[in-house]
Image (cartoon, rainbow, N blue to C red):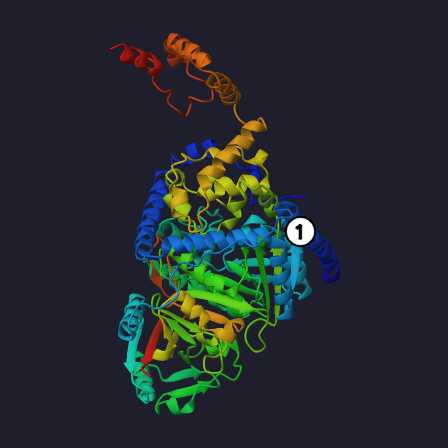
Amino acid sequence: MVEDTRCEVSTAREDILQRVRAAIGKQAADEPVERDYRQTPSLSEGEKIDLFIDRLHDYNAQVYRCGPGEEAATIAEALAARGKTRILIPPGFPAHLLPTGPTFVPDTQLDYREIDATEGALTAATAAIAMTGSLILTHSETEGRRALTLIPDYHLCMVYTNQLVETVPEGLRALGGRRTSPVTTIAGPSATADIEMTRVKGVHGPRVLDVIIVAV
Amino acid sequence: MSIRVGESAQAATFPKAAKKLLQNTQLRRNVRRATDTIRGKRAKVVDEMPDWQALRTAGQQIKKRTLRNLDSYLVQFEKACTAAGGKVHWARDADEANAIIIGIIQSHGQKEVIKVKTMTSDETRLNHALEAVGIEPYETDLADLIIQLGHDKPSHIVVPALHKNKSEIRQIFMDTMGLKELGHAPEDLAAAARNFLRERFLRVKVGFSGANFAVAETGSVCVVESEGNGRMCVTLPDVLITMFGVEKIVPSFDDLEVFLQLLPRSATGERMNPYNSIWTGVTPGDGPKEFHVVLLDNGRTKVLADEESRETLHCIRCAACLNACPVYRQTGGHAYGSIYSGPIGAILTPQLQGMEHSTSLPYASSLCGACYEVCPVKINIPEILIHLRRKIVESGGAALTERMGMAVAGYTLADSSRLGKAQKLVQLGRQPLDAIGLPGWSAARDLPTIPTQTFREWWKTRGAK
């Protein structure tokens, strides 16, 4: 069955490419693209962080700020505020940043149903965009595979101020060589506006998102 | 070859369907309320962008570049996606696409598939084809779930169940999910959907998605969504099948920075939608083990061939033109008899499936230009509507009165003495014309009042003074 389909597909490929070529003619040439939109920052460092926090609040995310070396205490504070005691972490999450008290379970390729039974996940991020309040994950060893921050109902994400950019173009370019890893951008908890265009927080993704901004 | 756009070939003509829908006051209230809300939100987040026009221009030019070199970008995408572990299939039309997808699902012995909202699969009527061979498709987007459970049809490109209000949705959920109790708040309805679908997300082995963008340079695919159902469908199943129209390609990864700004602000009036998933082939230890792409033509190369309306293929399916359109806002989407409704539907549907099946659609517009103004990639919809109307008239598809009228007008206006004589004639015939009207033309239009004096007569008397 699959073999038959493949045979047909290769003919379809030639047909479609031939139709495209006939449609666009031989004149095919590079069309210029003017990129006159904003691609560089315009805010001061402080303004950028304030804007990011403002956007996160807009999405009802709880925001914590701390200095270097205060990560563990802030993680403990955030988890306590939500009453979380057992949290998943990516296998490469730095152990020295973890507080004592809550149980941290490394995701060593757990079954999806096991992940579904946990209280939440704690991860790092690759970058963040102030203008849109976006966190960008490329699912590295400190961010975990995609399922980790998708199935549980709670996501606590830690981002450093030197990972924060102002605009969307800067955010995507910050991915560098990691752009062909799986990329997820997250702007607030999952939501829908499908019922009378009212934004309802929390459908299938985590219903609660908290963010820790660590000053560098 | 059979090109199908949903069920539209059998749909009633626009004026007939619209007339019926205009009598449904509940539906009109729902549509007006929802479109007012999105329009307001969109205007607010677009106004705060000083570089909005520059983004629109870049979006338009990137799409233009893509189409002018589409063959090489498709091949480049195929190569990059394959190198990253994906399998690329090509489908000339809806039936071919559906057969490929069914083949993949059956080769894994599976009977279920979880789907994230995709217009393209509505276009090919994939669900219908799957059900016919005993495969059960589960729609997971909240609005699509409402449509599927309520045996309804989508009426909007982005918010397909926009014609339903919350009490109607509640009733559908209670009837179909076997719930004895359910709250009335949107939050309660969203929670019901979460519970209903969670087990399916964890169980079903095959996922299906469309794509908002596909990057030729890297072979990456991008899905833009809000609920997390998209992330579930592209992450949890063992096998992922993604189908999109050939025009969804963008040349470079950097091009996403333009569209990921244009799309959310235009579509839902958000600065950024909650989730974007971008993936490239297969990643060991993270997500599906097998990834298939189905590149769909289904009439798109035909649209590409007409230089005057080619830019129809720039569309990124944001639906801003629907929300802005004074016609759509009165009738809702069902009147268009196509899954692609509103101004973009009025130009896309006839071109995809052939003008003969939808001659009334290019007339479903007052040519006010609101659609062009809000279009994030600057598709000149009014101009394309006129172009399509001309094609319909030339192929004999328009009413006889209109064709004769236009021919006579052409002859008369070409010569000033003919015009003078004609004007005299019209003045003489004014009263009888008012009485009988023009069959087929004046049914939906008022005939203009004919003045007692022509401009040229007035000019002469003015000169004499």
Q: Secondary structure at mark 1?
A: helix
User: Which is nearer the eye, B17 or B248?
Assistant: B248
Residue visible at 46% across and 61% down in the picture? B224
User: Which is nearer the eye, B126 or B393?
Assistant: B393
Residue visible at 36% across and 57% down in the picture? B51
In this rendering, is residue B137 above or below B328?
A: below
Position of residue B82 in the picture relative to residue B400 (left or right): right
The single residue placed furthest to the top in the displayed view is B428
In this rendering, is residue B463 above or below B178?
A: above
Where is residue B140 drawn, in percent x and y? 48, 60
Q: Residues within 10 Å of mark 1 (few under 14, many from 20)?
A: many
Q: Which residue position is annotated with label 1?
A: A16
Residue visible at 32% across and 90% down in the picture? A69
Position of residue B401 in the picture relative to residue B292 (left or right): left
Q: Amino acid at mark 1?
A: Ile
In this rendering, is residue A148 above or below A193?
A: below
Q: Is residue B268 visible?
A: no
Residue visible at 30% across and 71% down in the picture? A48
Where is residue B46 drawn, in percent x and y? 34, 54
Where is residue B338 drawn, in percent x and y? 51, 42
The single residue placed furthest to the front in the displayed view is B464
Q: Is residue B152 visible?
A: yes
Place residue B382 in its image quadrant.
Answer: top left
Position of residue B82 in the picture relative to residue A47 (left or right): right
Where is residue B247 drawn, in percent x and y? 56, 53
The single residue placed furthest to the left in the displayed view is B465
Q: Quadrant of the C terminus of chain B?
A: top left
Position of residue A27 in the picture relative to residue A124 (left or right): right
